[in-house]
Amino acid sequence: MRDQLKRLEELQTHDAKIQELENSLKAIPLKLAATQNDLARVEGLLGTERQALSEAEKYYGEQKGLLTDDEVQVAGAKHKLAQAKNSKEYMAAQREIEQRREGLTSREGEITKLNGAVDAKKKLLSERASDVEALKASIAKDGEAAKVRMDEIEAQIATLRGERDKLASEVNPEVLKRYSVIRMRRGLAVVSVRNGTCQGCNMNIPPQLFNVLQRGQTIETCPSCRRIIYWEDLMKDEPAASPPG
């Protein structure tokens, strides 16, 4: 029965390794998906900023057109001033010129600000577009590395499954069934008993059961957590036989 318990322990170790590798395998595409979501979000923000730049450039063009109109109106006012026939017409033309010039100066100032803002936005967008391209390249590189890593993990799992199947074939079918049921419910199915205490639930086992475990002739379960248990010292390697004197 000691051999059966050893096989169960080895089986449990393989199952734990397989589970760990499978979790790692599942985590890789999830991590890649999260990175892809980050890229999509950044590209969305970049698109929004490009739209804002397009609108700013459109407004800038409109203001440039209005500036031309302002210049025409100032020229018209100057013409009126030159054609004034009396002081009243002269004063009216002079006021119009001043008003037109104020509007022209104000629009020129706004256009200058717009020009600076558009240039700054273009520079920022160029930098961010470069960052996005760098992120794309990094994601592509990560994807290639992830594929290599996933292939490695799948190979490790296949190897462990082969070893696990061999171990399972060496365990009594009824014991294997008990082990599988317990593992599904508890995760950890096989634990030792140390100083009369189950290492799975930390509960003391009855003295009579502990005596049975020490004999190591049957497969027993903990009355508290229902895991398969064994006396810790029973599994220690037996000392090598002394050479004949």
Image (tube, rainbow, N blue to C red):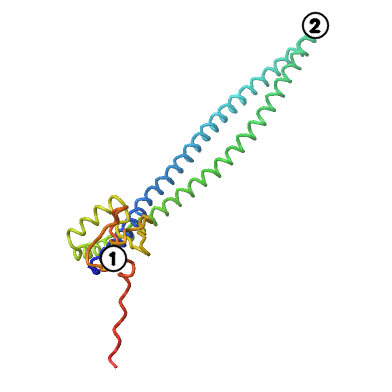
- Residue sitting nearer the eye, 159 or 204: 204
Q: Amino acid at mark 1?
A: Asn
Height in image: 112 above or below 219? above
Q: Residue at point 58% right, 24% down?
A: 62
On the image, the x and y values in percent for residue 18 come to 31, 58
Asked whether 97 or 183 is in front, the reply is 183
Provide the secondary structure element on which disc 2 rests: helix
Q: Position of residue 191 (x, y in %)?
A: 32, 60
What is the spatial separation of the Cα atoms under label 1 and label 2, in whole angstroms?
126 Å
- Give me the disc on residue 211: 1
| Residue 88 tag number | 2
Could you tell me the amino acid type at mark 2? Lys
Q: Residue furthest left?
A: 173
Residue 40 bears which disc, if any? none
Whether label 1 touches label 2, CB < 8 Å = no
User: What residue lies at 73% left-to-right and 12% top-to-bottom?
Assistant: 80
Quarter the N terminus occupies: bottom left
Reply above or below: 157 against 30: below
Query: Considering depth in this image, is 98 or 57 the residue closer to the camera?
Result: 57
For the C terminus, the image quarter is bottom left
> Residue 197 location in percent, x, y?
36, 60
- Asked where in the image residue 244 lies, by quadrant, the reply is bottom left
